[in-house]
């Protein structure tokens, strides 16, 4: 029988397996309106069973590696040896789906004891539009059930949120949205130093995408990104490029980060120290100015466009209102200092409108002249009704 999702034509590397299969499973469960904690738990159980098998059985057959020119075939084989075994996507996904089926069938007969991992019921609002651009190149991730997806049971609540703003195509943004949080979860320091895990995950995701780009020559895109990783009572943020995260506390915006832009003096000096220069001939530019100085992907812009993320951490006091993550399509029209007043005004107009606040913010940015893709993600850290009483 056909699988319930579209099977990609390209093979997978072993380092891509967990992210790609998890994304497929979560998409399947979401389409069937499964509660996210349940979907994450089922996905984790199925993924965890895969290493019990030798993934080499899914290695591409020689007939699948044929190319038109003999020299291209030799080059591909050399790259495969350097980067590890490539796996046939269809056979691997069919095996994975069968695992999901077995697990769901077993749980129908006998539900296991529910996990005691804490999970805060985060109220989130997210909205994204293509706007006047020809393509939608933004991606976002809302993962409040981080513990359930990765099997953490240490009584520390974790949640992950991210916005990725692609350029030159959507491939890099889509790739980061699938793999970056997996790389965070699998980093050996994630429980002791979450900020370090975030920084390393950006670098690792970039390296993975560049390896994929060498296998698939059409992948020339890049993406900026911003992530918020809530661990217990601490928010850890990491970013590349000009996507931003804003923390609002009692109606006042707190500065957690400074976006990377080529016109920043330190970024300009970094590029020039590598032998490059900020010019007007870059493929991705805004009003004649180099649009990105740090990103995942952009293979032909390395090392000038680097993937070294900056990180920051903030201890929560309980007085914080919400987090807002957005791409430059929003912040270029709505300055950070105006966000708190705009959100409060929208909530006063519609006190029960918190679930749609991101949609209202996107509309505001568009009305102010934004023509770019716009993505806004709001994570409320306390009851929105309390914000109106402050």
Image: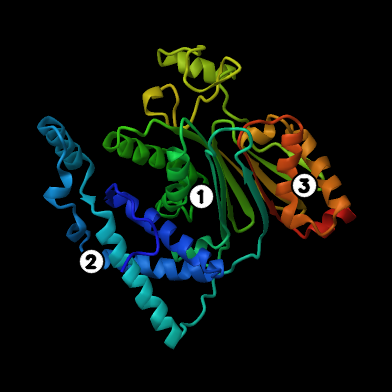
Judge whether 301 appears above or below 221 on screen: above
Q: Name the residue under label 1.
A: 194
Of residue 145 and residue 97, the one placed in the foreground of this image is 97
Q: Name the residue under label 2.
A: 53
- Left or right: 58, with 236 as reference point: left
- Left or right: 318, with 186 as reference point: right
Which quarter of the picture shows residue 53?
A: bottom left
Measure how far apart labels 2 and 1 are at the Cα level: 30 Å
Of residue 334 and residue 154, the one placed in the foreground of this image is 334
Q: What element carries label 3?
A: strand
Q: Nearer the viewer, mark 2 or mark 1?
A: 2
Rendered location of residue 172, percent (x, y): 44, 38
Name the quarter where the N terminus is drawn.
bottom left
Question: Which badge, 2 or 1, is on the more N-terminal residue?
Answer: 2
Farthest residue to the bottom: give it: 109
Which quarter of the picture shows residue 327?
A: top right
């Amino acid at each position: 029988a056909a699988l319930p999702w579209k099977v990609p034509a390209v093979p997978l590397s072993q380092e891509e397996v967990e992210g790609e299969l998890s994304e497929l499973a979560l998409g399947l469960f979401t389409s069937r309106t499964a509660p996210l904690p349940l979907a994450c738990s089922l996905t984790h159980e199925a993924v965890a069973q895969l290493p019990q098998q030798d993934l080499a059985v899914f290695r591409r057959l020689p007939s699948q590696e044929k190319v038109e020119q003999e020299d291209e075939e030799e080059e591909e084989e050399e790259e495969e040896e350097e980067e590890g075994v490539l796996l046939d996507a269809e056979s691997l996904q069919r095996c994975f789906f069968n695992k999901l089926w077995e697990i769901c069938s077993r749980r129908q007969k006998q539900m296991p004891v529910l996990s005691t991992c804490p999970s805060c019921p985060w109220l989130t609002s997210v909205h994204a539009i293509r706007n006047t651009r020809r393509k939608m190149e933004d991606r976002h991730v809302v993962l409040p059930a981080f513990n359930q997806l990765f099997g953490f049971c240490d009584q520390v609540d974790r949640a992950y949120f991210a916005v990725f703003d692609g350029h030159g195509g959507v491939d890099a943004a889509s790739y980061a949205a699938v793999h970056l949080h997996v790389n965070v979860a699998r980093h050996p320091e994630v429980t002791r130093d979450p900020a370090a895990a975030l920084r390393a995950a950006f670098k690792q995701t970039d390296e993975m995408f560049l390896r994929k780009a060498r296998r698939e020559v059409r992948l020339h895109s890049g993406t900026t990104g911003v992530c918020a990783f809530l661990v217990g009572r601490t928010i850890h943020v990491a970013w590349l490029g000009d996507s931003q995260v804003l923390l609002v506390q009692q109606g006042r915006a707190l500065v957690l980060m400074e976006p990377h832009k080529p016109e920043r003096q330190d970024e300009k000096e970094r590029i020039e120290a590598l032998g490059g220069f900020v010019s007007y001939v870059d493929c991705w530019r805004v009003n004649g100015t180099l649009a990105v100085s740090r990103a995942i992907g952009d293979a032909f812009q390395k090392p000038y466009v680097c993937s070294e993320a900056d990180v920051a951490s903030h201890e929560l006091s309980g007085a914080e209102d919400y987090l807002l993550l957005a791409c430059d399509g929003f912040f270029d029209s709505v300055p950070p200092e105006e966000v708190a007043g705009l959100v409060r005004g929208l909530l006063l107009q519609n006190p029960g409108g918190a679930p749609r606040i991101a949609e209202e913010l996107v509309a505001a940015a568009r009305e102010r002249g934004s023509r770019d893709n716009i993505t806004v993600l709001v994570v409320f850290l306390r009851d929105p009704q309390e914000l109106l009483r402050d």
